[in-house]
Image: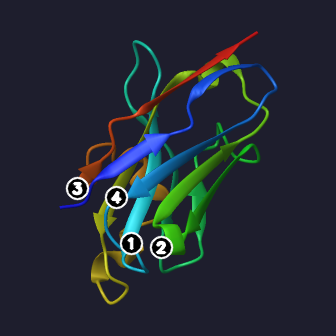
Amino acid sequence: QVQLVESGGGSVQAGGSLRLSCAASVNIGSSYCMAWFRQPPGKEREGVTVQHTGVGATYYADSVKGRFTISLDSAKNTLYLQMNELKPEDTAMYYCAAEYVPTWSRRLATCAQGRLSMTTSFDYWGQGTQVTVSL
C-alpha cells in the first residue's frame, strides 16, 4: 500500500507561484507512474501533468504548459509541482496520484499524455491540497 501526502497549497495572487509536494510512503525508485490532478470547485477532476519515475518524459495539460513543472526527488521519494504565473482558473484542490508500473511492463507506454484524461485510473491518491488564486 502506498500513501501519498500532499502539501504546499495556499492562497496566492494572480501571477504568483506555489510549489506543491507529494511525499510517498514507499521507495518510488524508477517504477511508478505519478501524476498531478486537480478539481476546480463545482467541476470534474482533470489531469495536470504525468511522469514515470524511471523515464524522463513529462506530459502536461495544455492549460498549464509552460507555467507548471513536474519534478521528482528520488532520494526523498517526493514528487513536486512548481506552479508559476498562476491564474484564478488554477484554483482547485490538487491531488497527487501514483500507480506501480515497472519499466519492463507493457503498461509503461500508458504513462503518457493520454493518462491525463483517465482521472480514476491510478491506484493510489493523496488527500489533496487546496490552491486558491485571487485577482
Mark found first going from the N terminus, 4 or 2:
2
Q: Which mark is on residue 28?
A: 1
Instruction: Name which of mark 1 and mark 4 comes first in the sequence.
Output: 1
Task: Tell me if mark 3 has few (under 14), some (14-19) or many (20+) residues whose alpha carbon lies within 10 angstroms of its own.
Answer: few
Q: Secondary structure at mark 2?
A: loop
Q: Position of residue 119 (x, y in %)?
A: 33, 43
Q: Secondary structure at mark 4?
A: strand
Q: Residue at x 29, y 84 (%)?
A: 105
Q: Which is more toward the observer, 75 or 62?
A: 75
As measured in the structure, the alpha-carbon distance from the residue carrying label 4 to the one carrying label 2 is 10 Å
Q: Looking at the image, which residue is at 45% across and 67% down?
A: 77
Q: Are marks 3 and 1 in contact (CB under 8 Å)?
A: no
Question: x, y (%) of residue 5?
Answer: 38, 46
Q: CA distance from mark 3 to mark 1?
A: 14 Å
Question: Considering only order in the chain, which callout, 2 or 3, is on the residue closer to the N terminus?
Answer: 2
Instruction: Report which residue position mark 3 lands on.
Output: 123
**Residue that badge 4 annotates:** 98
Residue 1, percent from left and from top: 17, 61
